Amino acid sequence: MKLDKDYWEEKWESKKTGWDIGYSSPAIEAYLSHYQNTEAKVLIPGCGNAYEIDVLWKLGFRNVTILDFAPTAVQILKDKCKEMKGVSVICEDFFNHHGTYDLIIEQTFFCAIPPSLRIKYADKMHELLNKDGRIIGVMFNRNFKESGPPFGGSISEYKLIFEKYFEIQKMEECYNSIQSRRGSEIFINFKKEI
Ligand code: SAH
């Protein structure tokens, strides 16, 4: 099965968006509420309904890019964000995206891509970040019985992938996960040092 744009677009068109929790993850919200620099350039890749945008907007972030390659998702977001000056909605494959960011938000995107692309994901994230930039967000710390997506994993697997690219400032059990993901999610904060 190819997890390409057509695969995801079909999910969006048929409303099989089982990953969508309906609001932004409280763990991400808590992190953002303490993030001082609202001038930061922020990217949310594989953003789906991008609920985080409401939080960012309320906090005063005005330099935000949200990206997904499923046209249906992007249309929903374009309608939602049309009054939000400073929010760019892009329909593009993450791996082809160019830009420079201070903060990239991860929420159910890493687990959506094939595990064979995980190193490419880390490499691309590194390329997209400014020095001292970081990826923050949540990742699964469990495996799934059915073949993915979502694809699971563990702290030790992720460490092997990301430590070559980032300083792993945090990768630990998430204490403020939503109920259905409690105990199966970690909070990550990876900083680009060089
Ligand atoms: N972050 C959202 C959506 C997660 S589902 C949430 O948590 O609700 C994964 C999303 O990533 C889908 O909307 C899919 O269309 C998108 N996606 C998957 N691979 C992608 C890629 N290579 N480039 C851009 N978007 C991608």
Image: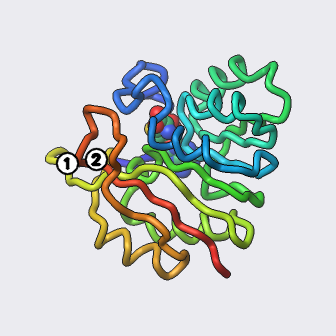
Relative height, residue 79 to residue 51 (above, below) = above
Q: Which residue is mark 2?
A: 148
Relative height, residue 155 to residue 167 (above, below) = above
- Left or right: 31 as drawn, with respect to 39: left
**Circle 2: residue type:** Gly
**Circle 1: residue type:** Phe
Residue 172 visible in the shown view: yes
Q: Counting other residues with Cα less than 10 Å from the Cα at mark 1, is it few (<14), some (14-19), or many (20 or more)? A: few
Relative height, residue 51 to residue 94 (above, below) = above
Q: Secondary structure at mark 1?
A: loop
Q: Nearer the viewer, mark 1 or mark 2?
A: 1
- Left or right: 7 as drawn, with respect to 79: left
Q: Position of residue 104 (x, y in %)?
A: 62, 53
Q: Does the numbered disc 2 mark a residue whose Cβ is under 8 Å from ligand 1?
A: no
Q: 9 and 131: which one is in front? A: 131
Q: Counting other residues with Cα less than 10 Å from the Cα at mark 2, is it few (<14), some (14-19), or many (20 or more)? A: some
> What's the residue at 81%, 19% (across, down)?
83
Q: Secondary structure at mark 2?
A: loop
- Tag 1 and tag 2, C-beta contact below 8 Å: yes
